[in-house]
Amino acid sequence: GGGFGSAFGEMGQSLHVSAPDSRANPQASVKCSACGHLYTAATKFCPECGDKYRACPNCGADIPKNAAKCAACGYEKPTPCPSCGAELSEKGLKFCPECGASLVKKCANCGTVMDGTPKFCPECGTKARENDA
């Protein structure tokens, strides 16, 4: 019969068809996010312009270097830790789980926690510095 084994097999097949990432199909065509050239997913760099292939783990499309998410499927890239570069997939962390660095930006003058990347403290108006974490 059918059961779990055949259901899993069908699910795996649909993932293979809908997600042309390099692990599932290294011969799938990928469009370079830098120059638009088509090449195979097994290639690590675009043969036309040399841009590195950054595969979306969800759909396999090439994600531009500075993009926050995949243009093809909307997958949001994890934020890197500013100290060690580890991927921070959880939102709202106060400390990096890899290196322990503070991920909360505080005003150097009054200590107010500042969300995002403000240019000035919303509480006292002091200019925010990049190294205030």
Image (spheres, grey):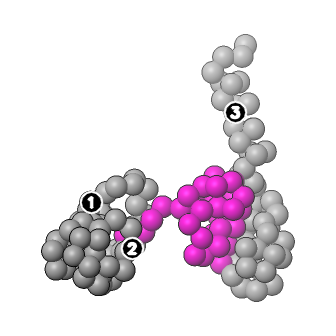
The residue under the point 16% across, 71% down is: 111
Segment tinted magenta in the rendering: 52-81
Q: Say if mark 3 contacts mark 1, CB within 8 Å.
A: no
Residue 131 drawn at (x, y percent): 28, 83
| Residue closer to the observer: 45 or 85 | 85
Q: Which dot marks residue 51?
A: none
**Residue under circle 2?**
117
Answer with mark 1 or mark 2, whichever residue precedes in sequence. 1
**Residue under circle 1?**
94
Let me know if residue 101 appears in the view. Answer: no
Q: Secondary structure at mark 3?
A: helix
Please name the amino acid that badge 3 sits on: Met
Let me know if residue 100 appears in the view. Answer: yes
Q: Nearer the viewer, mark 3 or mark 1?
A: 1
| Residue closer to the observer: 121 or 97 | 121
Query: Residue farthest to the left?
Result: 110
Q: Secondary structure at mark 2?
A: loop
Query: Toward which corner of the image does residue 45 lie, by quadrant?
Result: bottom right
For the C terminus, give its image quadrant: bottom left
Give the alpha-carbon distance from disc 3 to disc 2, as whole Å.
42 Å
Answer with mark 3 or mark 2, whichever residue precedes in sequence. 3
Q: Which dot marks residue 11?
A: 3
Give the alpha-carbon distance from disc 1 to disc 2, as whole Å.
15 Å
Where 74 falls versus 55 (above or below)? above
Q: Say if mark 1 contacts mark 2, CB within 8 Å.
A: no
Answer with mark 3 or mark 1, whichever residue precedes in sequence. 3
The residue under the point 76% across, 86% down is: 49
Considering the whole magenta stretch, tell me its main secondary structure: loop
Asked if residue 34 lies left or right of residue 74, the reply is right
Residue 77 drawn at (x, y percent): 53, 62
Please name the amino acid that badge 1 sits on: Lys
Residue 32 drawn at (x, y percent): 76, 74
